[in-house]
Image (tube, helix red, strand yellow):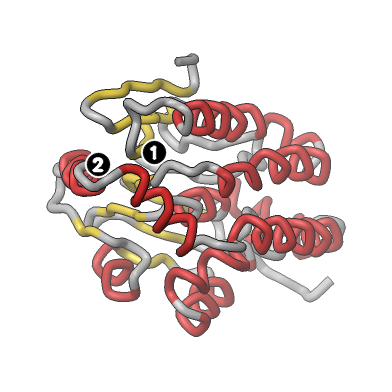
Amino acid sequence: MTEDLSVVLEEGVALLEMRRPPANHFDEALIGQIVDVASGLDHDPACRVIILASEGRHFCAGADFGGGEFARDHVTAAERLYRRAAELFDVRTPIIAAVQGTAVGGGLGLACSADFRVAEPSTRFVANFARLGFHQGFGTSVTLPEIVGRQAAADMLLTGRRIGGEEAARIGLADRLAEPGRLREVARLLAAEIAASAPLAIRSIRATLREGLAERVRQALDHELAEQKIHWATKDSAEGIAASLERRAPVFQGE
């Protein structure tokens, strides 16, 4: 347990809670903590399922382009972040993301790294990369179309529109839709169902279903970062990020 991440293991289920409210922006340090804890739980027979959750109004708003290392140097921060993010896909324990509020940009990517997502009607999933003026990241080039299909992923990525909890459930982005105020409860019920099955079989089945995923994500991360490096040098990207921080509509010029 650290200031930014709490860990509670009960009845076979580990609750990992990000504690950077309200937006729960991540960086290499926080993603690294999640990876290290989850990897350690792979070797704990008392843990059969992980729930990834967050404190505050929102699940995760991705990287903070208004402060911290991403504001200082997008490229270096992303290179370091993606090295650790790739390791999320090496974790062998099933992961459920309990998504309240908004999962936006890299936060959506983090939610998509999990096996399952539990949402509420008020939850919003947003692939806003193009609205910020750059290519998608955090492996969403692979994970998002694998979860919702190519057309739904294209819709999300090219429009950058918000997908509410009910629509997310319809397209398969949310695996369970909880009534308001019951998000953690529903996530725990799903975790308990998984934890009740034979643990060796669960890991074997999961490994089969996710065969090759980690390598495909690593390849995607390399490509995503290469594209992002190009875009972060453009006027459109500067405008998109500035508009987001200023809470206004961006005006892109194709430059």
Q: Quadrant of residue 53?
A: top left
Q: Report the Cα–Cα distance between label 1 and label 2.
A: 15 Å
Q: Quadrant of the C terminus?
A: bottom right
Q: Residues within 10 Å of mark 1 (few under 14, many from 20)?
A: many
Residue at the image position 66 percent from the left and 63 percent from the top: 216
- Outermost residue toward the bottom? 151
- Outermost residue toward the top? 2
Q: Secondary structure at mark 2?
A: helix
Q: What is the x, y in percent for residue 145?
A: 52, 73
Q: Secondary structure at mark 1?
A: strand
Residue type for callout 1: Leu
Residue at the image position 69 percent from the left and 29 percent from the top: 68
196 to 132, vertically: above or below: above
| Left or right side of 170 for 73 | right
Dot 1 or dot 2: first in sequence order is 1
| Left or right side of 165 for 103 | right
Residue at the image position 28 percent from the left and 61 percent from the top: 175
Which numbered dot is residue 52?
A: 1
| Left or right side of 191 for 216 | right
Q: Quadrant of the N terminus?
A: top left
Residue type for callout 2: Ala
Q: What is the x, y in percent for residue 131?
A: 61, 65
| Left or right side of 253 for 117 | left
The residue at which mark 2 appears reads as: 195
190, 222: nearer the viewer: 190
102, 95: nearer the viewer: 95
Q: What is the x, y in percent for residue 243?
A: 63, 55
Q: What is the x, y in percent for residue 173?
A: 37, 65
